[in-house]
Image: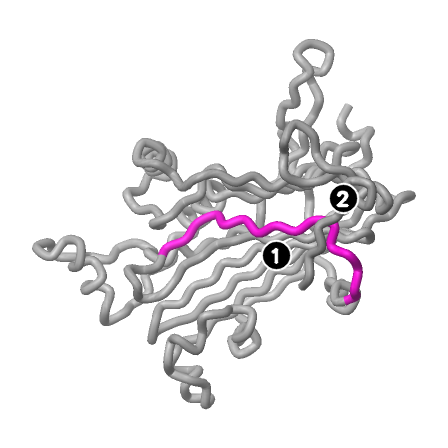
Amino acid sequence: MEVIELDEEELNSYGGKLLSDGRRGLFIHGWEIESRRGSILNSSSVLQWEQKLKTSHLPEMVFGENSLILKHVSSGAKIHFNALDALIGWKHKSLPPVEVPAAAQWKFRSKPFQQVILDYDYTFTTPYSGSETIEIDTEKGTSGKLSDGSCNLIWEYCKEQIDVVSLASKEPILYYDEVVLYEDELADNGVSLLTVKVRVMPSSWFLLLRFWLRVDGVLMRLRDTRMHCIFKSKENPVILRECCWREASFQALNAKGYPADSAAYSDPSIISQKLPVVMHKSQKLKLPCPSMKA
């Protein structure tokens, strides 16, 4: 995918403009698309997050200030992605820990004189597929601030799927970014990584939220959430969302003739089709009319 930097005049010719106030992103066809980046959590922030999540375990690198925000301005609907909500999903789901012969050795490296009991999901696998709110301008007449409404967006199950052929067309990329939410290298025995990517074209926006897990020699897990919204000037936007979870043990892959060496599985995009699907669902969201904000 080739991303060409457009100047402001070229961006305007496609109906877009850069966000103001030094924010990273653009406004196009009623959508405000913004990505935010910051440093990893410091020690005091880690303690605060552990208290919020009621846990003493967090990934090695948590980018607590990173986020991706897509806001449909006229309806107030906002879809956003952040590490805290993703970890709330991890904590709530609380999967059993992956059993691995080397697990105790990982922990003994840092605490060689303590017996180790793995009683939590150290892979930080999350069912997270994004966060959403409807922001209601209840205080415009006073302070001009926006406050979150209590209503949630309603996704409906459907048989429609994202048109990947149209996404492969050679449209110019008006905006692209990849935001890391958290990462853990499992003490050099694999990777646990949650990222979200967005790209904006003249006709639509598309994003991929991906959780990628590789426990070397044991297990691979891929949880993808894709969203696509086509710009339509005379209709309220419709967002298609596809969630697909894939998973396989190294043993099962080796039995099918795939390599047993973990080095062969560094890029999830290349090996995703080798992993069997354990869950797939398609949903769509019709954004509310602006009148619903009243």
Q: In which quarter of the image is residue 187?
A: bottom left
Question: Is residue 140 found inside the magenta-colored segment of the image?
Answer: no
Nearest to the eye among marks 2 and 1: give it: 2
The C terminus: image quadrant: top right
- Which residue is rendered at x = 45% and y = 57% of the image? 193
Q: In terms of depth relative to the viewer, which is nearer, 254 or 54?
A: 254
Residue 267 horizontal side relative to residue 27, left or right:
left
Residues shaded magenta: 169-184
The label shown at residue 7 is 2
| Amino acid on which disc 2 is placed | Asp
Residue 119 horizontal side relative to residue 144, left or right:
left
Disc 2 to disc 1, how far (Cα)?
Answer: 26 Å
Q: Quadrant of residue 105?
A: bottom left
**Picture layout, residue 139 above or below residue 224:** above
Counting from the top left corner in percent of width and height, residue 230 is at 80, 52
User: What crowding class fits label 1: few (fewer than 14 Cα within 10 Å), some (14-19), or many (20 or more)?
Assistant: many
Principal secondary structure, stretch drawn in magenta: strand
Counting from the top left corner in percent of width and height, residue 117 is at 19, 57
Name the residue beneath numbered marker 1: 208
- Find numbered disc 1 in the image and state the secondary structure of the residue it sits on: strand
Residue 293 horizontal side relative to residue 263, left or right:
right
- Which residue is rendered at x = 67% and y = 37% of the image? 78
- Which residue is rendered at x = 39% and y = 62% of the image? 191
Q: Is residue 76 visible?
A: yes
